[in-house]
Amino acid sequence: MTSLEFREKVISAREKQLLRLRETGKTSNAEMTNKDIEAHCTLSPATTELLQKAVQRLDLSTRAYYRTLKLARTIADLSESEEILSEHITEAL
C-alpha cells in the first residue's frame, strides 16, 4: 500500500468517526466515553468471548478493556468494517 492509499484510508476512517459521533460533539474514537463505547462497539458473541478470555489471561483493568475496544473500533474503521471482528480485537491487544 502506498502512503497516498493509506492517507485515503485514514481520511475515510476519520469521516466515519465524525459521522458516528456527531451527536455527542466528539470527533474521534479516542474521545468516546464508556457510554459511547457501549453504543458503538458491539461485538459478536465469539468476539466478546475472545476479549473476555484476553482480559482474564492478561489481567487487564477495566480501563484497558475500554481502551482496547476504542482501538479495535478504529482498526475496524481503517479496515472499512462496520463490525468489530476478532481480528480487530487481536490487533488492538
Image (tube, rainbow, N blue to C red):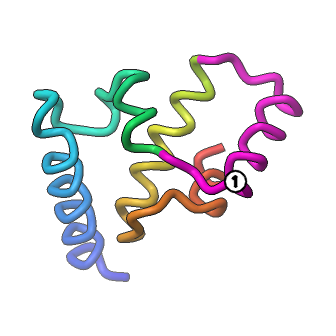
Say whether residue 24 is magenta.
no
Dominant secondary structure, magenta: helix
Looking at the image, residue 33 sits to the left or right of residue 61; the answer is left
In percent of the image, x 45 and y 38: which residue is there?
A: 70
Left or right: residue 78 versus residue 87 is left
User: Which corner quadrant of the image does residue 2 belong to?
Assistant: bottom left
Residue 65 image offset from top left, x and y in percent = 62, 28
Dot 1 alpha-carbon crowd within 10 angstroms: few under 14, some 14 to 19, many 20 or more: few
Q: Nearer the viewer, residue 92 or 55?
A: 55
* Residue situated furthest right in the rendering: 57
Q: Position of residue 24 (x, y in %)?
A: 16, 28
Secondary structure at badge 1 equals helix
How many discs mark residues in the rendered view?
A: 1
Instruction: Return the x and y of residue 42 as percentages of the image width and height.
Output: 50, 47
Residue 80 versus residue 56 in the image, above or below: below
- The residue at 64%/63% (across/down) is 87
Q: Which quarter of the rendering shows the N terminus?
A: bottom left
Between 6 and 73, the residue placed more toward the observer is 73
Q: Residue furthest bottom?
A: 1
Q: What is the magenta range?
A: 42-62
User: What residue is shown at x 17% (from left), y 61% (from top)?
Assistant: 11
**Given the image, on which type of amino acid does mark 1 rest?**
Pro
How far across and down, in percent of the image, does residue 48 sit?
69, 46
Position above or below: 2 against 36: below
Q: Quadrant of residue 75?
A: bottom left
If the image is split into quadrants, where does the C terminus sit? Answer: top right
Residue 47 colored in magenta in the image = yes
Report the residue marked by disc 1.
45
Front-most of residues 71 and 33: 33
